[in-house]
Image (cartoon, rainbow, N blue to C red):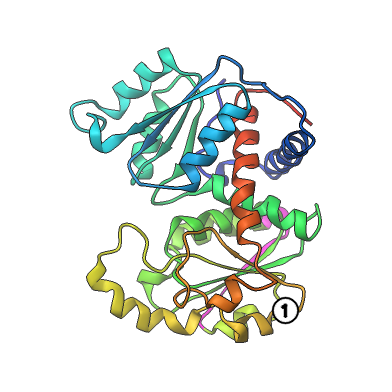
Amino acid sequence: MKKDLLSLADLQPEELKKLLAMTKAIKAKQKSGKEHHYLKDKTLIMFFEKPSLRTRVSFEVGMTQLGGHAIYYDVSTGPLGKKETMEDTGKVVSRFCDIVMARLKSFNDTKALAENCAVPVIDALSDKNHPCQIIGDLFSIQEKKKDDLKGLTLTYLGDSENNVTYSLMHGTALMGMKMRIGCPDDPKLSPLPEIIEETKKINQQTGGSLEIFHDAKEACLNADVVYTDSWMSYHIPEEEKEARLKLLMPFQVNQAAMAAAKPEAVFMNCLPALRGFEQTAEVIDGPQSIVFDQAENRLHSEKAIMLWLLGINVE
């Protein structure tokens, strides 16, 4: 039976730990210069409805380093979802390609694609999930902290009604971590109740926890990791910017927020980042920031994801 990676909520804790171990192994192979063409003659097709720097480059480079080939498909220039249904597309590309990556606006579209593909499908971002980002992030925390993430505290500040927050909620829960969210007391900027319930169920299994605060300093108290994301995602109209900034500025990651965390806490942002908005320049460019290590690790974690989905073990 073929495997997909659509949501971290679909994984068991041991599966996520396996992916992190494979990420460590594949990164070590590359850094040591060892040849690792595990996907020779394999083809990845990448459907992009939303733009991206890191996702496109990391998947294309990763596929090349694994000995395979990646095809970039810009949804805006083709018939996907219009003249060509997701269902038919899934059935067709399965005849040509070995693995599918989709960066689409709607998770329902990604699910429809996966349900009709005979090959593995990766959700590389949708309105509900960003699993590839968070697998790379958890590996980055392991590199800076320890392999066993259980009990570590990750604080997320800012707009919390988004795919990064949701996948962080699922991922930290699977690892038995403590996640704190600091966000405005506003439904449009807070996690959806159904995602909170999904996370609680995972936490009951792993011993993790989830707390939501409406005060940034309180949320950051003694945190091991402080994380934020863009306040103006691609889908947010420019005319909403001023009102959003007014609500979100108290949740900016600045020196005061970092001072509330542990002295050895690390700062993370999945990028792109605007200095002076979700974080100050002194934080993102300071000694506690690991944002560029985090970006690099997307390459290694995505190689591990593709290998895992195709049943190739590199540990």
**Toward which corner of the image does residue 38 lie, by quadrant?**
top right
Q: How many marks?
A: 1
In which quadrant is the C terminus drawn?
A: top right
Q: Position of residue 104 (x, y in %)?
A: 36, 42
Q: Is residue 217 above or below residue 197?
A: below
Give how far across and how far down residue 247 sits, in percent.
Answer: 38, 81
The answer to whether residue 185 is visible is no
Of 32 and 295, nearer the camera is 32
Question: Could you tell me which residue is drawn at 67 percent across and 53 percent down?
Answer: 138
Query: According to the image, label 1 marks what residue?
Result: 222
Image height check: is 238 above or below 301?
Answer: below
Relative placement, left or right, of 27 versus 119 is right
User: Magenta span covers which residues?
Assistant: 204-214
Residue 255, how many percent across, how many down? 61, 84
Q: Is residue 248 above or below residue 39?
A: below
Judged from the image, the secondary structure of the residue bearing numbered disc 1 is loop
- Which residue appears at 42% of the width and 22% of the height? 117
Residue 244 image-quadrant placement: bottom left
Residue at left offset 48%, top offset 65%: 273
User: x, y percentage for residue 77?
Assistant: 24, 34
Q: Is residue 249 visible?
A: yes
